[in-house]
Image (cartoon, helix red, strand yellow):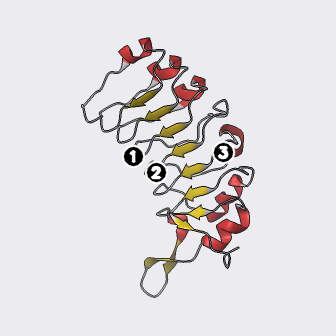
């Protein structure tokens, strides 16, 4: 990490590689990582990556941090059946509609905070993730309402709504769910 790497094509030869940290570089493509079948942990945060589709062949992947990139779409990661942790914090994702088809049901932790999700009803697309116990969704436009008096965004308590849809959640935005909230 922190090396100002741009070209990572030589990494495709390291087929036994299990953990890789490429955070804080200048990488815009990870297509060369598609042959790293033994990769279990990948950190590609803080780059300029637009697509993570190449990772769909990394079947051993358990943890993926792709936060703070330029990802706009939910891509097909459904073949990553070992994936437990997915961090897409601070990207440009505006809809969750394709999540049920494109993400593995094995997810335990999902971080989609600080994206462009406009509609809170999008949370309904997470209902099929029965093992999802930790969700970070804060700092999305859907979690505030415009105060007509002042013309600014005001937060509201979205926790009951999310817990109604996502019954397996134990931790929402870093705060554990209380008995009262259930």
Label 2: which secondary element: loop
In the picture as drawn, the residue positioned furthest to the top comes out as 13
| Quadrant of the snapshot with the N terminus | top left
Mark 3, Cα crowd under 10 Å, few <14 / some 14-19 / many 20+, is many
Give the Cα distance between marks 2 and 3. Answer: 16 Å
Comes first in the chain, label 2 or label 3: 2
Residue 98 appears in view: no
Q: Residue at x 40, y 42 (%)?
A: 69
Give yes or no for contact between labels 2 and 3 (Cβ–Cβ under 8 Å): no
Give yes or no for contact between labels 1 and 3 (Cβ–Cβ under 8 Å): no
Q: Left or right of 101: which side holds 108? A: left
Reply above or below: 140 against 146. Answer: above
Label 3: which secondary element: helix
Comes first in the chain, label 1 or label 3: 1
Give yes or no for contact between labels 2 and 1 (Cβ–Cβ under 8 Å): yes
The tag on residue 89 is 2
- Determine which residue is flagged by label 1: 68
**Where in the figure is residue 72, as x and y percent of width and height?**
50, 43
Reply above or below: 14 against 71. Answer: above
Tell which of 13 and 120 is nearer to you. 13
Q: Left or right of 118: which side holds 26? A: left
Residue 171 appears in view: yes
Q: Left or right of 182: which side holds 6? A: left
Q: Residue at x 62, y 34 (%)?
A: 77
Give the Cα distance between marks 2 and 1. Answer: 6 Å
Mark 1, Cα crowd under 10 Å, few <14 / some 14-19 / many 20+, is many
- Determine which residue is flagged by label 3: 99
Tell which of 135 and 76 is nearer to you. 135
């Amino acid at each position: 990490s922190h090396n100002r790497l741009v070209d990572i094509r030589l990494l495709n030869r390291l087929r036994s590689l299990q953990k890789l940290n490429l955070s804080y570089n200048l990488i815009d493509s990870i297509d060369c990582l598609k042959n790293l079948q033994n990769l279990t942990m990948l950190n590609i945060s803080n780059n300029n990556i637009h697509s993570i589709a190449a990772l769909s062949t990394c079947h051993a992947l358990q943890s993926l941090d792709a936060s703070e990139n330029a990802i706009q779409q939910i891509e097909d990661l459904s073949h990553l059946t070992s994936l437990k942790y997915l961090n897409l914090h601070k990207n440009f994702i505006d809809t969750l509609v394709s999540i049920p088809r494109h993400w593995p049901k094995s997810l335990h932790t999902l971080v989609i905070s600080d994206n462009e999700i406009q509609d809170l009803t999008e949370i309904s697309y997470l209902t099929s993730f029965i093992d999802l116990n930790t969700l970070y969704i804060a700092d999305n436009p859907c979690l505030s309402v415009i105060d007509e008096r002042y013309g600014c965004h005001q937060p509201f308590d979205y926790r009951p709504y999310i817990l109604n849809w996502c019954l397996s959640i134990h931790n929402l935005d870093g705060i554990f769910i209380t008995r009262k909230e259930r």
